[in-house]
Image (tube, rainbow, N blue to C red):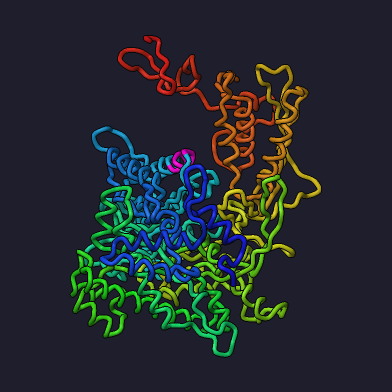
Amino acid sequence: MSRFAAPIAAQIWDMKYRFKEADGTPIDGSVEETWRRIARALAEAEAEPSVWEDRFYSALEDFKFLPAGRIIAGAGTARSVTLFNCFVMGTIPDSMGGIFEMLKEAALTMQQGGGIGYDFSTIRPKGADVKGVAADASGPLSFMDVWDAMCRTIMSAGSRRGAMMACMRCDHPDIEDFIAAKSDPARLRMFNVSVLVTDAFMAAVKADDAWDLIFDSKVYRTVRARDLWNGIMRATFEYAEPGVIFIDRINAANNLNYCEAIAATNPCGEQPLPPYGACLLGSINLARLVRDPFGEAAALDEAALDDLVAVSVRMMDNVVDVSRFPLPEQQAEAQAKRRIGLGVTGLADALAMVGARYGDEEAARLTSRWLRAVARAAYLASVQLAKEKGAFPLFEAAPYLDSGTMQAMDADVRDAVAADGIRNALLTSIAPTGTISLYAGNVSSGIEPVFAHAYTRKVLQKDGSRTEEEVVDYAVTLWREMFGDTPLPDHFVSAQTLDPADHVRMQAAAQEWVDSSISKTINCPADISFDAFKDVYMQAWDQGCKGCTTYRPNAVTGSVLSVTEKTETVPETDTGADVVYISEPLDRPQSLEGHTYKLKWPDSEHAIYITINDIVIGGHRRPFEVFINSKNMEHFAWTVALTRMISAVFRRGGDVSFVVEELKAVFDPRGGAWMGGKYVPSILAAIGGVIERHLIAIGFIEGEGMGLKTDPQAEVVAVGERPRGPACPNCGSYDLRMVEGCMTCGSCGNSKCS
């Protein structure tokens, strides 16, 4: 196979990982130069850089070892970026000053591109007393909204898409509100959310016992454990969140349980981390290590695996020393424990190459064997590094040997650790590898099954036209090269044909030898029964998993992954101008119900009429299309464009509430207008307000005005926000306050005294 096995691999390298000047001029002339840049940068931490540079290059060559995207893009560029993917931030104090100090730290971390995770259980529940100010607490969810807004702000300033994880303990008094938070399609969209489930809670669920909701030793109320569990299950059944993290199991299995407590994970869940813990990731590409693929002697080359793991561990350990960190606390934590997250990708492809069917008992056995080999080689490599460079600073032999993965290790590994220590406190983790797997030739991602054997990708060309190209799974491509059009064997399966139990079996088999955790999504069919869905989570608990995340197509998030009869599509990948369709547009029924609203803009002689038609899916009403008409021909071109664009977005399904936010944020440089006592910054903002009121009226989003009047003229005065005191005469914002004895606008600075 060629250096780049598929056009999409070359495109992703060019768009995401190729080192370029600020004006876009390439510095990396080829992917080989990218590998050389990474190898040279990571070898700088060695006493003999030239020797290790070549060995590191050999590991990177042909995509055998895949460092996380941050390392590929940032190593050796001298840019002020972190090479760590994600962080769990500091413990949030239960005080206003402490909370907003944490918000500042989050913004600084995200500014450098780091994803963040938090435990919001430390904030007192809604309605609790706030001593000294005679007020009631607003609760952790109100502050999560603040974090959500911060993340959107960081994105709008030009940084990469934000990623955040919010966790809450199953015994927090606000847990039920936390569970239901993302039923609102417009709320907490920058967060993944997960419930921290304890062993005691799972025992109470199985026994159908009572369960106390507690904060600061005070019992706020008592619920049935099984009712709370069913609430979690119903929420994730309906809108895919929250996930479940078995937090006691994580802490019990932690190699460092003698010196740290974990209460949160990174955004994708594969790295449970202590406060200020950092997530450093890399993956062994198993698909490149299969000898005689599809042949009678097909097998994973375990000797080559051992060598590759040893070099990869050394490379990742060096990242700890050469990376920048957003905060000094994160650097101190990383260097004190030197944890790394070495995982695998291409597992499903490797299984197919050796004739195993993903999800069956033989595939689970091979998965356990291969990941045991990875763990063993990684621990031995880290012991060798400790002999050479010293153990991690917080290493204590007796408690370390008594904890976590070390208890299951072979005697020779335990003896080596006891004699020489170990360089890295934790070594293995399985991360989501979607983009780097595409970069490596579309190998299967992480330990996930192949989603689709092939799919068609629409690519936007410079002249505005679109072309189609086939993107084929790595193992399927290899099969075609070897056997032409011969049909794929039966053991070639995809996510579309697997039972959820197959997913759980594979996750459990992998977890046995992964000392951190695993990012994996268990795909469930839309028509799965609720009882069968709940059983997936209980299977994950019973089989020893550290958490469980499912995805079932639903009315809130839409069908993120879909397959049509002719074309298979996959999640959108961020490759610049490339267009990858998330799902097929919704089909238009013969007739639709809707409402028409009249909007009179003060500076226009003619009214604008906005018609919004709805469709019902799964018993829920959602917007389907918009028509905007006016006799004023000045508006004709842009109203037609707006009609087509908004309708195209609505027909893709999922959370489309952002359309309202985007329209309402448009300010006309000529000034807005006062409508019904409310300042509206532009005619587009007025249209956004009408759409917002319609979405509230049909129950698609929550807000005031559920009892919207049917009189279209009534909608004219519903546009904009309600006044909050007097408006600024200069900019119209409701942000007037007394400053140094004069009424001053906090938005534009206008003051009567100036």
Q: Which stretch is magenta?
A: 151-157
Which residue appears at 26% of the width and 65% of the height? 47
325 sits left or right of 666 in the view: left
Which residue appears at 49% of the width and 78% of the height? 289
- Is residue 39 visible in the rendered image? The answer is yes
- Towards the viewer: 304 or 453: 304
Q: Residue furthest right?
A: 590
460 sits left or right of 395 in the view: right
Q: Position of residue 293 (x, y in %)?
A: 57, 82
In this rendering, the answer to whether 268 lies above or below 688 is below
Q: Position of residue 565 (x, y in %)?
A: 74, 65
In this rendering, the answer to whether 120 lies above or below 46 is above
- Towards the viewer: 301 or 731: 301
Instruction: Give the main secondary structure, helix, strand or loop, of the magenta stretch.
Output: helix
Which residue appears at 35% of the width and 71% of the height? 515
666 sits left or right of 153 in the view: right
Q: Position of residue 83 (x, y in %)?
A: 38, 55
- Towards the viewer: 568 or 141: 568
Q: Residue furthest top?
A: 753
The C terminus lies in which quarter of the figure?
Answer: top left
| Residue 707: quarter of image | top right
Q: Position of residue 54 (x, y in %)?
A: 38, 69
Magenta run includes residue 435: no
The N terminus lies in which quarter of the figure?
Answer: bottom right
Which residue appears at 64% of the width and 36% of the height? 694
- Is residue 86 visible in the rendered image? The answer is no
Q: How many marks?
A: 0
Q: Residue furthest bottom?
A: 296
200 sits left or right of 440 in the view: left
